[in-house]
Amino acid sequence: SIHFKSLEGKLYSYLPNKGERESRVYVPQIEEVRISLIYDTNLAPLMTQIEIGTEVMPDWDALANRITTLYQTIYRPQELSGQEPTPFKIDAQAQIPAQAVINTLNICKKAGVGRVEFAAKSPPARGPTK
């Protein structure tokens, strides 16, 4: 007959007492995540160069992956810790086809981002008045 030797071990763990306060994880606040859609006639079919900050996205799948990563590392932890989530802003040039803007919005929503805004263009500078 076969006999197995029983193994014994101890697991040391320290759990908080009832009187101790729960610690919160601080997630640094970032002003915004800006998604720039830049018109470029060399990029068919939507003629759009996609950038997040200074990072150029080669295609829509790369944008989706990057937005998902940003959601998981920035947006979601802020939501869970009770902080105001960082807005994701779509900054599209006037010549950008509407479909490119819709694609970007859909990618953000699919990733779970609930705070998507559109960047407003600054009014042109006015000269001195006489």
Image (tube, helix red, strand yellow):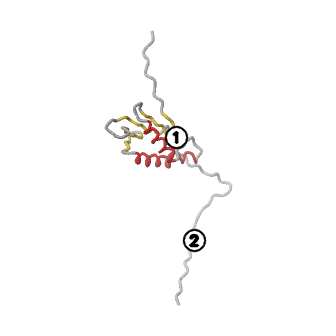
**Circle 2: element type:** loop
Residue at the far left: name it: 42
Above or below, 11 relative to 114: below
Residue pictured at 56% horizontal, 73% vertical: 9
Give the quadrant of residue 82.
top right
113 and 76: which is toward the camera: 113
Residue positioned 42% across, 30% down in the render: 94
Within 10 angstroms of label 2, few (less than 14), some, or many (20 or more) residues?
A: few
Residue 125 versus residue 25: which sits nearer the camera? 125
- The residue pinned by badge 2 equals 10
Task: Between label 2 and label 1, give the one nearer the viewer.
Answer: 1
Instruction: Say what secondary structure mark 1 lies in.
Output: loop
Relative to 20, 45 lies left or right: left
Residue that protrudes farthest toward the top in the picture: 130
**What type is the residue that disc 2 sits on?**
Lys
**Residue 126 coordinates in the image, percent (x, y):** 44, 18
Question: Amino acid type of disc 1?
Answer: Thr
Q: Residue 40: percent from the left, percent from the top? A: 34, 35
- Residue for point 38% across, 42% down: 55
Q: Do residues under tags 2 and 1 come within 8 Å of each other at their CB atoms?
A: no
Q: Is residue 25 left or right of residue 99?
A: right
Residue 33 picture location, percent across and down: 47, 40
The residue closer to the viewer here, 98 or 31, is: 98
Alpha-carbon span between mark 2 and mark 1: 44 Å
The residue wearing badge 1 is 86
Check the image and report above or below for 50 versus 11: above
Left-right relation of 95 to 6: left
Which residue is at the far bottom?
A: 1
